[in-house]
Amino acid sequence: MRILSGIQPSGEPHLGNYFAAMRQHVAYQEAHEAIYFLADYHSMTTLRDAAERRHFTLDLAIDYLAAGLDPARAILYRQSDLPILCELAWILTTVTPMGLLERAHSYKDKIAAGVAIDHGLFAYPVLMAADILIYNPDRVPVGQDQKQHLEMTRDIAQRFNHTYECEVFKLPDPDILEDVAVVPGTDGRKMSKSYGNTIRMFASQKELKKSVMGIVTDSTPVEEGKDTSSAVFQLWALFADEDERKRYFAAAEAGGVGYGDVKKDLLKRLLEFFGPMRERREELLARPDEVEDALRDGVARARGLAEPVLEAAREAAGLGRAP
Ligand code: ADP
Ligand code: TRP
């Protein structure tokens, strides 16, 4: 099966990003043909600082490699290293109805918030369709928030095929990571960069300690039973297996487990879990050339898969010399 997904370089990953997205992405490389890219073109719709974009993009590549992405198996590339995506985006733009784009939640939300909209943001779903359709992937694993974008991709693919009476594009199946529980942040709400309640995977030990000790808990005394659906227990459970979780939760619900101890154990587990990744990350930070080599190799492989599909689309649409 061919898997494709894109990740926006928008700041340092946190536990929500890791457990809900990165971990799955890395796991797919075992049994599937996995293609991932760092969506720096997409980031242009929100981030206007060139140096920051460069930095975030390379950093995200390093984080993925540190998290176990093996560039010898999965393809990892930087979106802007494959500018033919922009050609396909243009081709697709010409079969995309305005009404379809006007219905996009991301666009409507921005309008509602009074944000000045540029054409890039409006056309974002078309570039996303190009990112996907250029590989004819079987599955596109994304979070719930991207569901509508995938429906639009299917719609755009269908319109192209219909317009030019061809079957150049396959309709990809969404692979919505719905079963992945929402990872709570330190304040109990969904962990998110925009809430400032994150625990960053690669934060310093000192910062991690501060984040973990700062997880909001209620004032239930040690000897009383605890509510194990609360953030601190749910975060702890990310680092435990099913048996351990059952035993620990039963003990906590019966009383006698203090929040301080849960936090200490959570911190210990967290450091252990991410320790090897952190070391790998330090190594990669010191060797950015190695990361660039992986991206260069990745884009060469991606181009090999993408070019024939673009060529088929050009031919179907009567672009370029007659074959
Ligand atoms: P943020 O909300 O911090 O800006 P992103 O929107 O960049 O995070 O999310 C990147 C990926 O991580 C998406 O696939 C999203 O579904 C997933 N994700 C982010 N936060 C959480 C969370 N708290 N729980 C589960 N998944 C999450
Ligand atoms: N829009 C996605 C996000 O914000 C990122 C993305 C861009 C993407 N192109 C894609 C995801 C293609 C999957 C496939 O998370």
Image (tube, rainbow, N blue to C red):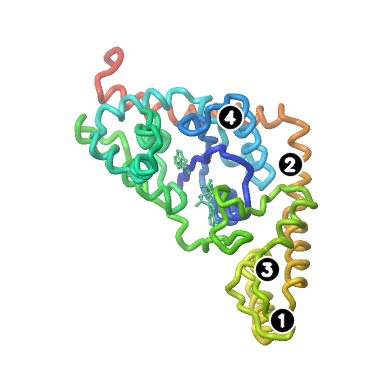
Q: Calculate the distance from the C-alpha at mark 2 to the C-alpha at mark 4.
A: 19 Å
Mark 1: few/some/many CA within 10 Å (<14, 14-19, 20+): few
Q: Which residue is drawn at 75% across and 62% down?
A: 267
Q: Position of residue 137 (x, y in %)?
A: 41, 42
SS at badge 2? helix
SS at badge 1? loop
Tag 3–tag 2 contact (CB < 8 Å): no
Mark 2: few/some/many CA within 10 Å (<14, 14-19, 20+): many
Q: Of the numbered discs in the image, which one, if any, rests on residue 53?
A: 4
Location of residue 125 by image quarter:
top left
Mark 2 is on which residue type?
Answer: Arg
- Does residue 261 appear to the left or right of 183 in the view shown? right
Q: Nearer the viewer, residue 296 or 43?
A: 43
Q: Calculate the distance from the C-alpha at mark 3 to the C-alpha at mark 2.
A: 23 Å
Q: Calculate the distance from the C-alpha at mark 2 to the C-alpha at mark 1.
A: 40 Å
- Say which label, 1 or 4, has the lower sequence index: 4
Q: Eyeballing the image, is 12 above or below 258?
A: above
Which numbered disc, 2 or 1, marks the residue closer to the eye? 1
Residue 126 in sight here: yes
Mark 3: few/some/many CA within 10 Å (<14, 14-19, 20+): some
Q: Calculate the distance from the C-alpha at mark 3 to the C-alpha at mark 4.
A: 36 Å
Q: Which of 274 and 106 is in front in this view?
A: 106
Which numbered disc, 2 or 4, marks the residue closer to the eye? 4
Mark 1 is on which residue type?
Answer: Pro
Q: Which of 121 and 221 is in front in this view?
A: 221
**Number of numbered discs visible in the structure rendering:** 4
Residue corresponding to mark 1: 221
SS at badge 3? loop
Q: Calculate the distance from the C-alpha at mark 1 to the C-alpha at mark 4.
A: 47 Å
Residue corresponding to mark 2: 281
